[in-house]
Amino acid sequence: MKHRCQWAGNDLLYQKYHDEEWGVPVHDDRKLFEMLILEGAQAGLSWITILRKRENYCKAFNNFDAKKITKYDSKKIKQLLQNEEIVRNRLKIAATIQNAKCFFEIQKEFGSFDKYIWQFVNGKPMINNRKSLKEIPAMTNESDAMSKDLKKRGFKFVGSTICHAFMQAVGMVNDHTVNCFRYNKFK
């Protein structure tokens, strides 16, 4: 039996996400954009809620094609607000469109979103040595800096807690507990 981080629990979807995705370094711009949007969609909700709706988000938001999302008009927004398969929150939908526009500005400035976002950890994953879930902070100095800079650039739903969760999800931070079978994979 594999020992996992405590948060993965007994839910098979959570376990699959933990075992195959969470903490794996991501350098693909589209995937980074997807995770930033999904983490923002989670605000005020549990991650499992978003994880269960993830496939629906992919369909609703053109597989997180930021270029297409920047062109969403009032008709598309109305359609999204009626889509019961996603979180129908007007502010979060508007933030997704706004964030897609800001995402392109960063790509123009830095050459890629990957190059920009990974600068907050000096281009390589931060390896932590957490023994239990209670030792993992909700935010860090790095997530504070990321949040502040993203907000300055016009992004929405990118508070420090969301940024830290994003950093964990895309492998910028290894917050697998030391007794987790995934911990040493990214050390």
Image (spheres, helix red, strand yellow):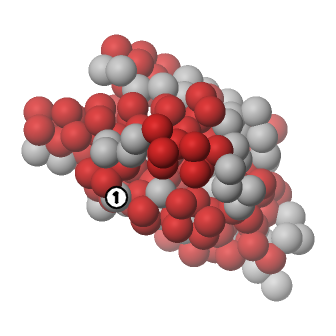
Q: Is residue 94 left or right of residue 68?
A: right
Q: Residue at x 19, y 33 (%)?
A: 105
Q: Is residue 6 left or right of residue 87?
A: right
* Residue 63 on image: x %, y %: 43, 65
Q: Residue at x 60, y 69 (%)?
A: 55
Dot 1 crowding, Cα within 10 Å, few <14, some 14–19, many 20+: some
Q: Outermost residue toward the right?
A: 10
Q: Is residue 112 left or right of residue 1?
A: left
The residue wearing badge 1 is: 65
* Residue 10 on image: x %, y %: 88, 71
**Which quadrant would residue 181 be assigned to in this image?**
bottom right
Label 1: state its secondary structure. Answer: loop
Residue 5 visible, this orientation: no
Residue 185 visible, this orientation: yes
Q: Is residue 159 left or right of residue 136?
A: left
**Which quadrant would residue 29 be assigned to in this image?**
bottom left
